[in-house]
Amino acid sequence: MTTPDPRPHGAPGTDPTPGAAGSDRPTVPPSTPAGPVAPAPSAPPAAKSRHTGRTIGRTLGLALLLFVTVVLVLFVVFNTQTVDISLVFADIEAPLVLALLIAAVLGGLVVGLLGAVLSARGRRRKR
């Protein structure tokens, strides 16, 4: 003996195939439910990846490295002529790019040493 299903047709838990074998109901197209419909459960919102900033930083670093490399290659290509360099004790001939790079390295060393001296003075004053 079967008991009639008290749930309305189309409600959750009912047979989705109307008129299936063993069903006393006539075949009718499913209707939309009359009440408010809860949204289907969706995946939780994707949390921001903790590595997004690191990835952006690496990308920007790579782009900057590529840019500096291109600029340095162009710098070397356009400064190939030979120039006279007057040192304290001698005069030499060298490519212009070499003279400019030596001057840049020496300038960087001076700035680095000056920064180190000022930093050490600042630490000594704070004591």
Image (cartoon, rainbow, N blue to C red):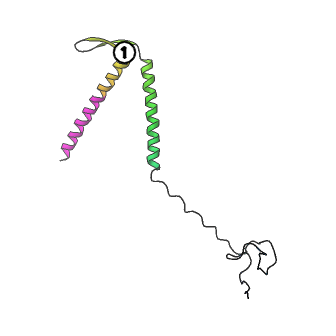
Residue 98, compared with residue 49, is above or below; it is above
Image quadrant assignment for residue 108: top left
Residue type at tag 1: Pro
Residue 82, compared with residue 123, is above or below; it is above
Q: Is residue 6 left or right of residue 42?
A: right
Q: Which residue appears farthest toward the bottom when viewing the image?
A: 1
Residue depicted at x 74% and y 85%: 4
Instruction: Indicate the quadrant containing the N terminus: top left, top right, bottom left or bottom right.
Output: bottom right
Magenta stretch containing residue 125, yes or no?
yes
In front: 49, or 9?
9
In terms of secondary structure, what is the magenta stretch mainly? helix
Residue 54, compared with residue 37, is above or below; it is above
Region in magenta = 108-127
Residue depicted at x 18% and y 43%: 124
Q: Where residue 46 sits in the image (x, y, percent)?
A: 53, 58
Query: Number of marks in the image?
Result: 1
Mark 1 nearby-residue class (10 Å; few <14, some 14–19, many ≥20): some
Q: Where residue 12 sits in the image (x, y, percent)?
A: 67, 75
Kind of element beneath mark 1? strand
Residue depicted at x 44% and y 19%: 77
Q: Where residue 30 sits in the image (x, y, percent)?
A: 77, 72
Residue 70, compared with residue 5, is above or below; it is above
Q: Is residue 111 left or right of residue 29?
A: left
Image quadrant assignment for residue 43: bottom right
The residue tagged 1 is: 95
In front: 100, or 118?
100
Residue depicted at x 28% and y 33%: 112
Q: Where residue 69 sits in the image (x, y, percent)?
A: 43, 29
